[in-house]
Amino acid sequence: MASNWSLCGVCDNRQLTKSSLVWCSECDEGLCEDCKEHHSISKGTKDHETVSIAEYKKLPTEVLQTATVCKIHNEKYELFCSRHDYPCCKKCLKSHNDCKGLTAIKELIKNVKTSNAIYEVEQTLLEIVENIKRISTNRKENLTSLENKKSEIEAEIKQTRITVNRHLDKLQDDLMNELMAVEQKERSKIQKLLTSLRTKEKEITEYIAIVANIKQYASKLQTYLVMKRIEQDIPAEEKIIQSLAKSDSTNQINISFQINKSLQQITTTVQKFGDINVSSDQSDLSIQKWKDKQAQIIALPNRKIDNLTLTLQKRINTELSNVRGCSLLPDGRMVFSCDDQHKVIVLKSDGSKDFEKNKIGNTFDVAFIGDDAIAVTSGGSDKINIIDLKKKKLRKTIKVHSKNDGLVYKDGHLIYCARKKGLQMISLSDESITNVTNNKISNFAYVTTFGDKLLYTNIDNDSVTCCDYHGNILWTFCNTSVLTAPFGISVDNDGNVFVMGYHSHNLVVISPDGQRYRQILSREDGLRFPQVLQYDKSTNTLLVANENNGAWLYEVK
């Protein structure tokens, strides 16, 4: 870029000296007030974007030093070679004769600031920062765990010493008690004999009590059986009594003591209290990878549908009837389309009205398309309106030659439900239309996208279908016991599919493979003929709306 920020490049070429006010990156020069005006209306430069010198200087050095002209031929880059992943000027074409897929840079950069590519870069950079924080938190937690473990080991060492001392004290006490017990035993055999006799006397007395009880309360059969058992036990009891009576209690008993050799050797054999070991276990640290989320419909999802929880953030009184579409804007505002009143209303994040666009004809679904604009389908009409959110007016109307219901925005294209014509996709740059599927789709169908998959609803057969961009069906969900008249549809970061049940008055979430489902909102939560919803992947919030006067914003975890 030019080294002199302060001078107007056009005037400088005319040997005039004027201060520059704005910078044109495409012309790579500053412009004064007069040249700026001519630059903005000239046929060749009227589409060039300019920015004030003060603002442009705020860009990082690596951005300012990025070359926009070929270093070899000193000509402006006009083409991009996808094979070599490198920009080219016209003179560079000689070295790219065999390359296919050369694309005009003007086409590539048309919607670059609102493209999915820049969104992916932003998400990846945010993800890297988040992962750095995760690793830092993990290491700090490890430091804390090391300190805690050190304290635990210190306490364990001290406790072991106490335990050893207590154990030796106990061994000593046990031995003394044993000595006393042995001496007392041999000295009191007569007393022990008397104790044995008292025990036997008690057992015989219990037999007598049993006999008395069975005589009074037992049946004859019970009495007979119990008496037979007692008769069998009596001889043994008599034999024991006779043996006790004949026992010899005058034998000489000697008491001796031999110390445990292990105790004598403890001071020589035990040289260490213990060992301190260091081990390294693989961390269970989870690193996020944003791009991997795009393939979650095939891989195992991070969040199972059974674990999803919804927390109500606010209830929105739309004061609208026949709401057909809703959308969450990046700044927190909410958009609703009302077919009965032929208007689109934009609410602030607190639910108060920002503005509304009236008299735009039939309205159906609505989607944010970047560049401070939204697209609104028209249902039974053949047009799609583009509304400028900043200027609060209709920017343009696109004829699509088919009725159009639900829509979703992706990478500079609108994908919409075209009823008899199936799913269609229109480029916002040149308004060319491509057929995605030729299968007829019901009226009031809605569509969303996840990675390289499309998902749409069909009220004619109460189904949700997942297909690829060639129209090949991957799976279909249909279960009228839980979902009837599916309308609005949206997908979270893990591929979980949220679907409104218009006649079942509920919100159902379906697993990315279409095999499992779960009802997460119902009539008890206020849903009555619910029609539309949108999941905001950047904030993990879910906006749901009834057909008439009622919407809710939930946080999803």
Image: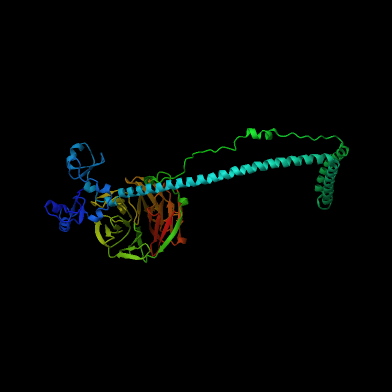
All told, the count of numbered labels is 0
Percent coordinates x, y for residue 447 in the rendering: 35, 53
Q: Furthest residue to the left?
A: 14
Image: 476 above or below 347: above
Q: In front here: 173 or 422?
A: 173
Percent coordinates x, y for residue 165 in the rendering: 66, 42
Q: Is residue 199 left or right of residue 515?
A: right
Residue ID at (22%, 38%): 99
Asked whether the viewer can see residue 459, the reply is: no
Asked whether the viewer can see residue 370, the reply is: yes
Q: In front here: 183 or 283?
A: 183
Q: Is residue 104 left or right of residue 548?
A: left
Q: Which image quadrant is residue 174 in?
A: top right
Q: In front here: 535 or 333?
A: 333
Q: Furthest residue to the front?
A: 267
Q: Which image quadrant is residue 322 in?
A: bottom left
Residue ID at (56%, 37%): 275
User: What's the colour scheme?
Assistant: rainbow
Percent coordinates x, y for residue 254 in the rendering: 81, 34
Q: Is residue 47 left or right of residue 201?
A: left
